[in-house]
Amino acid sequence: MTDTHEPFEYDLGDDLRILRTTRRASGGGTWVAGTIDEFRFDALVFPEHADNPDWEIGESRISKLWIARLDTKQTVFNWDRGLDVPAATDKTQAVIDFLAAGLAEHIYAR
């Protein structure tokens, strides 16, 4: 995650929609596709932390997270065991923080 964004106060979560979950056949983890606010996301979440802490966003148990705007389909964030595309806006960072704080817990009911 980046430190270049100011904290963004935004009420997220009421409109979180999980559209699909797919357990991986090998390697564990679950692919999660969904929407939140004006964004679409795909995430690979795990029940346990990564062997290498650098592979997940903070302590989120998310090793891959792609976020795009619904209206333009523009990628506004991408993490694939490391940062590929930083958060485009403070609002994007708020969505990342929200998903990192609870998506794995929601999927694995922990």
Image (spheres, rainbow, N blue to C red):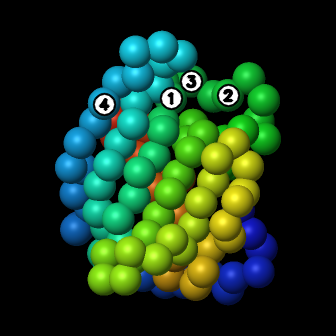
Q: Amino acid at mark 3?
A: Glu
Q: Amino acid at mark 2?
A: Ala
- Describe residue 89's horizontal placement relative to residue 95 as left or right: right
Label annotation for residue 22:
4
Q: Looking at the image, which residue is at 59% across and 60% down?
A: 78
Q: Residues within 10 Å of mark 4 (few under 14, many from 20)?
A: few
Dot 3 corresponds to which residue? 48
Q: Secondary structure at mark 3?
A: loop
Label annotation for residue 50:
2
- Describe residue 2's horizontal placement relative to residue 68 as left or right: right
Rendered location of residue 61, percent (x, y): 57, 37
- Position of residue 68 relative to residue 57, above or below, is below
- Position of residue 9 relative to residue 56, above or below, is below
Q: Residues within 10 Å of mark 2 (few under 14, many from 20)?
A: some
Q: Residues within 10 Å of mark 3 (few under 14, many from 20)?
A: some
- The reply to whether discs 1 and 2 touch (Cβ–Cβ < 8 Å) is yes
Q: Looking at the image, which residue is at 70% across and 59% down?
A: 84
